[in-house]
Image (spheres, grey):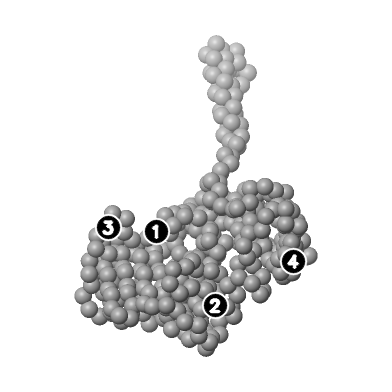
């Protein structure tokens, strides 16, 4: 049959056409199997980490077999501020001891704000931004600590359950900072526990596995401040929509990457077991800093930010001229590769 077809002119044309079609088909089939090069997903810009030290620090890493395990990739996290209705704001105010009609103020930045004041405390609720700010009036006096740290965390869970459940986004207490707020005008200081007159319980969105850390030690986007007696002195909570991860996952530095880029770590502050946050020494007085632990957190690098990126927190002993022997250095480093 094939020989007869080859002897005819039309048969030769048919076979030639068929052969060409087969070659073209094979060419396109081969091309479809060639994988296109994958585009590398570039991470967002590094978070803004400000440090007093711009020169190279005497840093080393010694994890002594205690090498942490980190995920290969992480997303950025987006927190959207959710507005509050006037009805919900008044329900919150009533639970906080302000069961009366508020003053109203409308500003360019926070929009409409409801204000409650009495001789005991004051409360500001910004409806557009969903920000709640409550504070007791008067100076803080030194009091003995009546609750343990664990009891402060339990009290926070009870407070959220009894006063904010179903009214605000879900939060969980994470850890405690020990603060000292001086009488009259004065800046808040992070101190050792025995010198604290305020116990600040940090709040994290329930849906986030990592802690949200402020660029300033001891400060937090959402928190509750307790007196040592267990009474609430102040709180600041932002109503957020569900914390959502960005769709893109970005590669995280390995421990080897951290070691190779250790010069990118920014020194934030020093403390010790017996001293408050220590004043920054001159660079020539810093003999050595040895990183003994590394953990991950999301950094709040700006009050106006709503997109947060992970950082490494590096901590370890520091040998510094005329500083306590138990001085510890705290450094931050961007975590995305």
Q: Nearer the viewer, mark 1 or mark 2?
A: 2
Q: Nearer the viewer, mark 1 or mark 3?
A: 3
CA distance for labels 1 and 3: 20 Å
* SS label for mark 2: loop
Q: Nearer the viewer, mark 3 or mark 4?
A: 3
Q: Nearer the viewer, mark 2 or mark 3?
A: 2
Crowding near pointer 4: few (<14 within 10 Å), some, many (20+)? few
N-term-proximal mark, 1 vs 3: 1
Q: Which residue is mark 2?
A: 196
Q: Quadrant of residue 117?
A: bottom left
Residue at 49% in and 66% down: 187
Q: Looking at this view, name the residue that lies furthest to the right.
A: 64
Q: Looking at this view, name the residue that lies furthest to the top.
A: 9
Q: Position of residue 97 (x, y in %)?
A: 31, 81
Residue at 50% in and 85% down: 143
Contact between labelled residues 4 and 1, with CB atoms less than 8 Å apart: no
> Where is 54 relative to 125, above or below?
above
* SS label for mark 3: strand
CA distance for labels 1 and 2: 33 Å
Label placed on residue 80: 1
Crowding near pointer 1: few (<14 within 10 Å), some, many (20+)? some
Q: Which residue is mark 3?
A: 107
Residue at 30% in and 60% down: 128
Q: Position of residue 222 (x, y in %)?
A: 44, 68
């Amino acid at each position: 049959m094939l020989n007869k077809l080859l002897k005819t002119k039309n048969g030769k044309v048919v076979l030639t056409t068929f052969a060409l079609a087969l070659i073209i088909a094979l060419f396109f089939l081969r091309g479809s199997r060639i994988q296109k090069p994958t585009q590398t997903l570039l991470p967002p810009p590094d978070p803004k980490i400000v440090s007093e030290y711009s020169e190279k620090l005497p840093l080393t890493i010694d994890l002594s077999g205690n090498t942490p395990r980190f995920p290969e990739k992480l997303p950025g996290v987006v927190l959207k501020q959710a507005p509050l209705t006037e009805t919900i704001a008044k329900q919150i105010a009533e639970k906080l001891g302000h069961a009366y009609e508020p003053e109203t103020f409308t500003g360019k930045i926070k929009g409409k704000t409801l204000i409650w004041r009495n001789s005991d405390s004051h409360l500001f609720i910004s409806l557009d931004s969903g920000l709640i700010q409550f504070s007791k009036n008067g100076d803080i006096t030194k009091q003995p600590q009546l609750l343990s740290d664990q009891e402060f965390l339990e009290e926070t869970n009870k407070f959220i359950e009894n006063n904010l459940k179903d009214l605000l986004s879900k939060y969980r207490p994470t850890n405690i900072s020990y603060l000292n707020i001086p009488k009259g005008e004065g800046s808040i200081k992070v101190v050792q526990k025995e010198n604290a007159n305020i116990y600040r319980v940090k709040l994290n969105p329930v849906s986030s596995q990592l802690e949200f850390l402020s660029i300033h030690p001891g400060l937090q986007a959402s928190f509750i401040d307790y007196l040592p007696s267990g009474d609430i002195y102040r709180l600041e909570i932002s109503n957020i929509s569900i914390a959502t991860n960005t769709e893109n996952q970005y590669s995280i530095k390995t421990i080897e990457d951290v070691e190779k880029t250790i010069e990118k770590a920014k020194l934030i502050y020093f403390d010790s077991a017996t001293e408050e946050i220590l004043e920054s020494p001159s660079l020539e007085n810093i003999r050595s800093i040895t990183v003994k632990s590394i953990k991950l957190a999301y950094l709040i690098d700006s009050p106006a930010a709503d997109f947060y990126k992970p950082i490494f927190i590096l901590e370890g002993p520091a040998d510094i001229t005329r500083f306590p022997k138990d001085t510890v250095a705290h450094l931050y480093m961007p975590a995305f590769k």
